[in-house]
Image: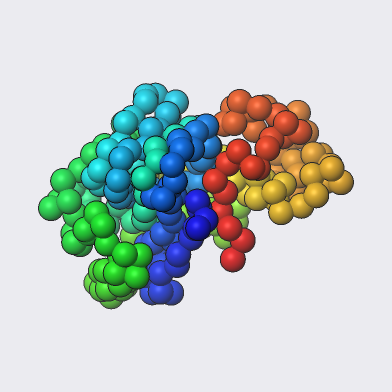
Amino acid sequence: MNLYSEHYVTPKAERFVNKIWCLDNSIGESLIENKLVLPNGCFNLAIVTGNAIEVHTSKNKYEMNEGIYFCSQMTNKVLVNIQPKTKVTIIQLHTWTLSMFPKYDLSNFTDSILKINPEELPFKVRNNAEIETLLNTINIYFEELAVLHLNKNVIERICEIIKNQEEISVSEISKDLKSSQRLLQIKFKTATGLTIKKYIQILKFRKSVDQMVNSDLEKLKLTDVALYNKYFDQSHFIKKFKDVTKTTPKMFDPNSYFLSQKR
């Protein structure tokens, strides 16, 4: 059994859900410790069954026993320890998904985890549900949400512009959307906890990591990675990389991390 696995929703539901991923130590007899997760611009709903998982963010240490947890946007690497007989199933939500529920103000909520009451969720989730059952529940709910919201709201449009143009300023985004920079910044931070600039930095960072992981790092020049991902130069790339991982690109060990599988 693989410790890490990924499961994918339908194309319609994928507008709001990136994927479901699992950390499965349910038949393990020993602690899995010091594994790392990198920020990627998504929110996560974590369903913990069995004993517990310990998570260290840049702000706090969380002991997550059985239950459902809402994980905010992360801006730095996260350290994870998974106890024996424990499974964590994680619903990864796109950056704009929470903006579909405007009652939530996430302005000051980053690098944090909150245990939630399952009854508060708009869809029913059981702790011990099989992945097929969970996928079916998620697909039904988010396909219906896509029908209810045919038009993209401002947060989704901001993210779409950033994805399509990669290197873009807030002023350029405001011109595209014919809105003031200040208003866009307020709306984006309320919905995500991040500034638009910070979100762009996180996406750029993850793109560079994916490029490194999927290439032969011994042959890949850091200057090429830096320039390809629109960093000023190699030293600028190394500095930004260390800000998140606390290590240099040359010392980066992919085996220490839970990294996305290449589809």
- Would you place residue 263 above or below residue 112 in this image? below
Q: Residue furthest toward the front?
A: 29
Q: Is residue 81 among the parts visible in the rendering? A: yes
- Quadrant of the image containing the C terminus: bottom right
Residue 37: x and y, percent?
A: 51, 40
- Would you place residue 232 above or below residue 219 in this image? above
At 35% from the left and 65% from the top, the residue drawn is 131
Toward the viewer: 199 or 131? 131
Residue 136: x and y, percent?
A: 30, 72
At 58% from the left and 58% from the top, the residue drawn is 261
Looking at the image, residue 113 sits to the left or right of residue 217; the answer is: left
Toward the viewer: 51 or 20? 51
Residue 125: x and y, percent?
A: 22, 59
At 33% from the left and 30% from the top, the residue drawn is 62
Color style of the picture: rainbow
Q: Is residue 149 among the parts visible in the rendering? A: no
